Amino acid sequence: MTARPAPSHPPLSTRTEFAALWQLAWPILIGQLANVGMSVVDVAMAGHASAHDLAGISLGVSIWNIIIITLMGLMMSVAPLVAHHVGAREFDKVPHLVRQGLWKALGVGLVALVLAQLSARVFDHMDIEPHVHEVATGFVQIISFALPAFACYRVLYGYSASLNQTKPLMVMSLGALLLNVLVNWLLVFGVGPFPRLGGLGCAWATLLCVWFNLIGLLVWMRLSPAYRSTWPFAHWEWPHPEKLAALWKLGFPIGVTYFAETSAFGLIALLIAEFGSREVAAHQIALNFTSLIFMVPLSMGTALLTRVGQSLGAGDPVAARFRAWVGVKAGLGFGVLSALGMAAMAHQIAWAYTNDATVATLAAQLLFLAAVFQMSDSAQVVISCAIRGYKVTRSPMVIHLTAFWGFSLPLGCVLGLAPEWLPWRPVQAMGAQGFWIALVVGLTVAATGLLLLLRRVTRAHLTTQHAPHHTTP
């Protein structure tokens, strides 16, 4: 078979590619910041209600985050497939894919609801204050009813982003954030005729906002002409086992990858509960702020997945590789800036969350450690998204499991808990600080492994196509 000659084209420009990447990423970023902003509002308002409310929310959020981020990974299988179809101009294949993705989301969301209800029982076996137990259990039980809606929203989220339609995601998230602030204020503090629910008010606010996101995005899509050629609700379609199996095969490793990372962060709150509510609250403050900063490289990664996937769908592995490495450079650059800013403002950030001097001091110490791993964290999320653009998901799963469950959690237990049966352990348990030191190690291992994998994947695709054509959208 004769290779197709590549047509002449202008040289690929880093500046032009970064501008295109940012054009796609900035609405995603604002939307992601708004989504995390809801958690910031929850934590901040609970913190000003009482330290016990903050500790209860921290424990509840630790389980909530593990579940929803795992769901995000499981639902991400739609995005690279849609991006490839868009790059290949196969728009007629998109509606069927989205419909099957929604069937998958409905099933997974209902299972997640049941698992969340069961997971709330873990607090019955923890040595925590009664009020903290009440808030943590109630938070998980209430908010679990948002999970089916969240799973369906993430399918539509990936579908919209892969069509280069990211502004609707931003608008919906900003609207949900405003709604969250209002409902939190009314229910946490009991304004006017509304009951004072303390930390449980945060759960009701988040539940309402997740459903608002789903319904609002559906209405936007129905009214916007950008979705007409790929509108997935033109007719009814039952689940197709073969397509669901393909979506599950691609999405399951991503879900495990996300679970490995978020569980390494989320389980810390449960493991350090024995050190008291202030230690848990300090951990949650540091985790909450770093999650907010994390949205920048995550948004770049989401946009990069679309750019790389569209290039490969158009049969252009040269452009795909170029776009991948531009995204990695952008992620590393942001990691440097966020590390410097976080280290310089650690104390001010902590005091913005709480009036408790002990909690603020502990949180500032954790934020210094978070500054150390910013480059690794930014790099690993951008690189992993670039690799998913190639529809490669199993190898990143192995790397993340090794980094977080092979390094971070075991080392964190040694440093943070210092169990007496170990032949080597710190003189005194380091609590949350020990776990955060271990996170630095785990994130560095993940970033290094993913970097090597990206080099291998991009080179392999270049060797399989000798003559790409540059018609990338």
Image (cartoon, rainbow, N blue to C red):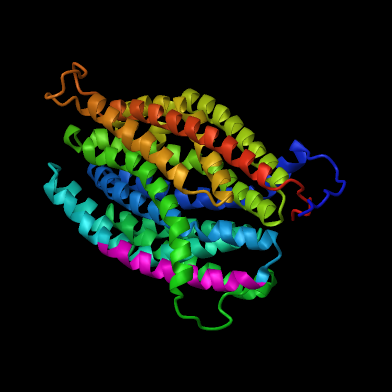
Q: In the visual, does 378 lie left or right of 66? A: right
**Image mark count:** 0
Q: Which residue sits furthest bottom?
A: 235
Q: Which residue is at 43% across, 27% downward?
A: 346
Q: Position of residue 166 (x, y in %)?
A: 62, 57
How far across and down, in percent of the image, does residue 405 sit?
Answer: 32, 37
Residue at the farthest top position: 427
Q: Residue at x 37, y 69 (%)?
A: 107
From this viewpoint, is residue 195 visible?
no
The stretch of residues the image draws in magenta is 92-114
Q: Is residue 291 magenta?
A: no
Q: Residue at x 37, y 31 (%)?
A: 439
Q: Quadrant of the N terminus?
A: bottom right
Percent x, y for residue 359? 29, 31
**For residue 335, above or below residue 383:** above
x and y percentages locating residue 164 in the rendered image: 66, 58
